[in-house]
Image: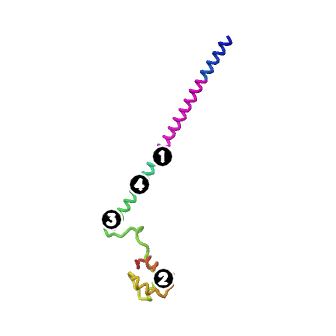
Amino acid sequence: MDGILVQESKELVDRLEAAATLLERTLGWLEDRQRALSGDVERISATVESTRREEELLAKLQEVERELSELRAAAAGGNEFPKAVQPLRRTLPSSTAEVVAKHGVGEGAVDVRTLDAALTGLSMEQRIAVKSQLRRAGAMA
């Protein structure tokens, strides 16, 4: 009788070990499946975020294209540019105008050779400052 109990116990233990092995395999499969599914969810959410960003960028692009077409139409029609595009005030500081006027350089576009001759008495820094002011004012290219 003890032999039969031992034999049944061994069979029970073997069955329990087989069931435990099967459970471990099933658990491993479930973990792999869970990882695969979570990766799919991450890819889906990344795709949704990227399409939202694309929509935002398309809206901005359409707005810029509309503004560009308005500016082109204004330029082609000879209309005055909108305030945002109008150039800044183009005046020379009085000291620069005096230096240039003393040497006979008048209003309008300034010839570079004439300007160089007029500024020979100034230091290098002063000549650079005068030329940069004339460029900002649009009097010199």
Magenta-highlighted residues: 17-43
What is the crowding at mark 3: few (fewer than 14 residues within 10 Å), some, or many (at least 20)?
few
Measured in 3D between alpha carbons, the distance from the residue under mark 4 to the one under mark 3, in whole angstroms, is 21 Å
Counting from the top left corner in percent of width and height, residue 71 is at 36, 65
Kind of residue indicated by mark 1 = Ala
Q: Earlier in the sequence, mark 1 or mark 2?
A: 1
Kind of residue indicated by mark 3 = Ala
Name which residue lies at 50% across and 82% down: 124
Name which residue lies at 37% across and 59% down: 65
Q: Earlier in the sequence, mark 4 or mark 1?
A: 1
Residue picked out by circle 3: 73
- Between residue 141 and residue 137, name the one nearer to us: 141
What is the crowding at mark 4: few (fewer than 14 residues within 10 Å), some, or many (at least 20)?
few
Q: Earlier in the sequence, mark 4 or mark 3?
A: 4
Kind of residue indicated by mark 4 = Ala
The residue lying furthest to the left in this view is 77
Residue picked out by circle 2: 127
Q: Nearer the viewer, mark 4 or mark 2?
A: 2
- Between residue 67 and residue 123, name the one nearer to us: 123
Q: Earlier in the sequence, mark 1 or mark 3?
A: 1
Residue picked out by circle 4: 59
Contact flag, marks 1 and 3 (Cβ < 8 Å): no
Q: Quadrant of residue 104?
A: bottom left
Measured in 3D between alpha carbons, the distance from the residue under mark 4 to the one under mark 1, in whole angstroms, is 20 Å
What is the crowding at mark 2: few (fewer than 14 residues within 10 Å), some, or many (at least 20)?
some
Contact flag, marks 3 and 2 (Cβ < 8 Å): no
The chosen color scheme is rainbow
Q: Is residue 1 magenta?
A: no
Counting from the top left corner in percent of width and height, residue 95 is at 48, 84
Residue 46: image tag: 1
